[in-house]
Amino acid sequence: MVEYEMTGNKPRSMPEREHAWPIYDIFETAGGNRIFIGVVTEGHWQSFCREFALQDLLDDPTLRTTTDRILARGKIIPRVAAEIKRRDVAALSAKLDALNICFSPINRPEDLFDDPHVQRPGGLVNNINANGAAFRVPALPVQWNGANLGEGLLVPRLGADTEAVRAELERGEIPTTRTAGRRA
């Protein structure tokens, strides 16, 4: 956004754009899952290569600097992809987390019903649609007065309160537009 705002250039999206890091990509894992991995520091590079059987890349004298590695992405990425393809996404995520390396498994929307963020208390709201069928929807990760916004935020059935609202209006219990805000 900043590049576009300051220069007017429309940056290319991943993976077409030029990279500022040697590994900042989406990879396929064993089982067909996908994961984003970002190796963005010298420490990340060293620990990543050691942990994932890429010592040959770490020892390669043509890959000493970050710039060298960025220029050699054509050599590095296929090797990394082959290694990542051998690994289970859950075990891989645990390793990357322990190494403090940027990562994110890539989920499909229906997979998110099992996500810990959604499974937290108040993370899913049960509701009924206009046809009476039950459905679940993720709640916003927001708290109000120490409580999660979640259950209790029901979608009203169209017209469900019409009679009650009319009755209150006829009794003068709900201020109308003309009298709202006036003091007696």
Image (cartoon, helix red, strand yellow):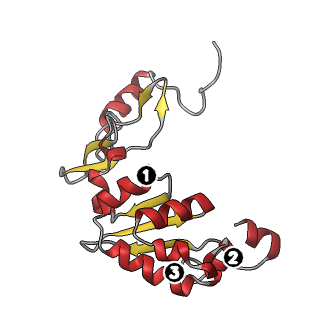
Whole-percent x, y for residue 113 in the image: 28, 53
Say which label, 2 or 1, has the lower sequence index. 2
Q: Is disc 2 placed on a helix, strand or loop?
A: helix
Q: Residue furthest bottom?
A: 74
The residue singled out by tag 1 in the image is 97
- The residue lying at 44 percent from left, 76 percent from top is 80
- Mark 3–mark 1 Cα distance, whole angstroms, equals 21 Å
Q: Is residue 105 left or right of residue 31?
A: right
Q: Is residue 62 above or below residue 122?
A: below
Amino acid, disc 2:
Thr
Q: Is residue 178 left or right of residue 122?
A: right
Amino acid, disc 1:
Asp
Say which label, 3 or 2, has the lower sequence index. 2
The residue singled out by tag 2 in the image is 67
Q: Nearer the viewer, residue 27 or 118?
A: 27
Tag 2: Cα neighbours inside 10 Å, few (<14), some, or many (≥20)?
Answer: few
The residue singled out by tag 3 in the image is 76
Amino acid, disc 3:
Ile
- The residue lying at 52 percent from left, 86 percent from top is 75
